[in-house]
Amino acid sequence: MPQCAFCGKATTTQEGLKRHIARRPECQRQWALMINDIEADNLNTPDDNPPPVDIDFSHVHPHLDPNPAPSKSRRIIIEEVEDEDGTPFSYTGRYFEPQADAGWVLHEGETKFERYRRHQEEEVEDRWSPFEDAEEWDLAEWLVKNLGQTRTDEFLKLPITQNRMKLSFHNNRSFLQRVDALPRGPGWSCRKVTVRGNKEDEFGAPLEEEVELWSRDPVECVQELISNPFFKADMAYSPAKAYADRAGQHRVIDEMWTADWWGETQKALPKGATIAPIILSSDKTCLSQFQGDKSAWPVYMSIGNIAKAKRRQASARATILIGYLPASKLDCFTPDAHSLARYRLFHHCMALLLQPLIAAGQHRVEMVCADSLVCRVHPILAAYVADFPEQCLISCCKENRCPKCLVGANERGDSLDSPMRDPESTKEILEMRKNGQHPPEFEENGLRAVYKPFWADLPHANIFLAFTPDLLHQLHKGVFKDHLVKWCIDIVREEEMDA
C-alpha cells in the first residue's frame, strides 16, 4: 500500500498518494525541499544537458492532479502518461512552476453524487433506482438524449413497447416522474421587473411594462460544476507557469490556469484560496421571424478550472444555462429612447442575476470539489464571451467605439497605442453624469448613460479585459471582409476578383 514519506499517511492507490502530497501544505513544503536538493545536485554536475530526474512528477499535471505541487524548479520534465481509461496526455516535455499558496484543502467532504449513493445504501435501494435495472436506465438515457416529450410518449405507448419490454413507466408523464426523482441541479426562479417608459397613457400617467427575469443562483452553479466527479481528471485548482524548455525561457499558455491573470488575482486573495474563474457568455437570439418575432436572451456560465478540451465538448455539459434575460421590445418608450432603455434594462437584470457572486467573491464559499476535498472558493468573473454589439452593450459604450480601449471612432484600425478602458474611472465618469455633471470624458470615451453597470461591484473583475475575440464580427467580417477583400479589390479590380 503506498505511503507518504513525509507524514506517513497510507493511501489505497498511487494516484491517491500523489493527490495527498500535492494538496497538503506541509507535504508540499517537504516535497519542494526534496526537489531543490535534487536540483542542486544536478546543477553541480558538468553535464550541460542533464537527464530528467528519475522521479514520477506526473501529479503536477492538472489533468492528473488538479493542484500542482509547490516546486519552483523548472527542470522537472513531465513524462507522457496514460489516464485510467488509457487516454494518453500530450503534455510531454512541459516544465511547471506551480504557485504553492493556492488551492489548499480544508478537509475531506462528500459530493452530491456520493451523498446520493450513501442514501441509496442506507435505504437499501437498488443502484439503478428509480429505474428497475441497468437496461431500463440505459433506455431512459437514450430517450432523454434522442427523443422529445411527444416522441417519447408515442414510443412508450406502442403495443410492442408495452407488451414485450414491460417497463416500469408506461407514458411520458410517468417517465418524467422517475427522472425528476434523480438528483438535480440548481433550481430556477422568476422575478418580475417593472419598466417605466417615457410614453404616457390617455390619463397622462407613464406607461409601464412588466418583464420576466428567469435565473439560477450562479454560486450554486459554480458548486455544481466544481464538484462534478465527471470533471475530476480535467480540473485545476491553482495556477502555474508552464514552459517548453528547462531554462524557463519559452512560456506556454494554453489553459486558463497557465495564464498570468489567475496568478495575479491569486495574490489579492488570502493564502490557500481557490479561484473559480467564471466564464460568462450571452447572445440575444431570434427564435421566429414569421410568428410574432419571438426572441430569447440566454446567459451561460462555465469555469476556467475545467480543461478547455473538456469544456468545449458539448456532450460534457461543462457550460450551464444560468438565466434568461428579458428580450422585450419595450414599447413603453419612444423610438429615440429605446436604445438607452435597452442598455439600462440589460445591466439591471444582469446585476440581479449575478448578485450572489459579489459576497461569494469577496468572502469565499466552502465547496466540495470533484475529488471530494473541501476548499475555500472565490468565484471571480474572468472572461465574457459575446459578439461585438453585445460587448459594447456590456462596456456601456457606443457601437462605433472599441469596448476594450479608448481609441477614437475615426482612429480604429490605425497603428496607435491606445490606453485600455479602466473600470474605476468609467464608474466615476458615469457617477458624475448621474449627478447632473457633464464631464468631457463622457463624450470622449463614447459612453452611454448607464449609471449602474452590472459589473460595478463584482470583486477583482475587469470587464474590459474579460472580453474574448469575436470571430464573426472582428475576424471574418472585420479583418477579412471589411479590410482584406476591399484591399484585394482595389489592387486587382472588382472585375478580376469576380472572374
Image (tube, rainbow, N blue to C red):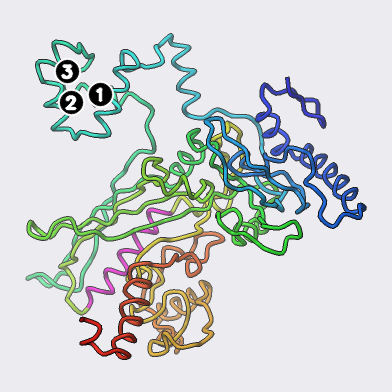
Marks 3 and 1, the one that precedes in the sequence:
3
User: Along the horizontal axis of the image, is 310 left or right of 83?
Assistant: left
Asked if residue 264 lies in the magenta stretch, the reply is no
Residue 475 against residue 308 in the figure, above or below: below
Magenta segment range? 337-354
Quote the CA–CA distance across marks 3 and 1: 11 Å
Marks 2 and 1, the one that precedes in the sequence:
2
Dominant SS type (magenta)? helix
Eye-nearest disc, 3 or 1:
3
Quote the CA–CA distance across marks 2 and 1: 9 Å
Q: In which quadrant of the rendered view does residue 385 lie?
A: bottom left
What is the x, y in percent for residue 269? Answer: 65, 54
Local SS, label 3: loop
Q: Do the residues labelled 3 and 1 touch (CB within 8 Å)?
A: no
Q: Which of 487 and 382 is in front in this view?
A: 487
Q: Nearer the viewer, residue 395 or 498?
A: 498
* Residue with the mark numbered 3: 170
Identify the residue shown where x is 37% and y is 58%.
350
Q: Nearer the viewer, residue 296 or 336?
A: 296
User: Along the horizontal axis of the image, is 22 left or right of 321?
Assistant: right
* Residue with the mark numbered 2: 172
- Image quadrant for the N terminus? top right
The three-letter code of the residue at mark 1 reads: Gln
The three-letter code of the residue at mark 3 reads: His
Q: Are marks 2 and 1 in contact (CB under 8 Å)?
A: no
* Residue with the mark numbered 1: 177
Identify the residue shown where x is 75% and y is 40%.
25
Q: Which of 85 and 23 is in front in this view?
A: 85
The three-letter code of the residue at mark 2 reads: Asn
- Image quadrant for the C terminus? bottom left
What is the x, y in percent for residue 464? Answer: 48, 70
User: Along the horizontal axis of the image, is 81 left or right of 226?
Assistant: right
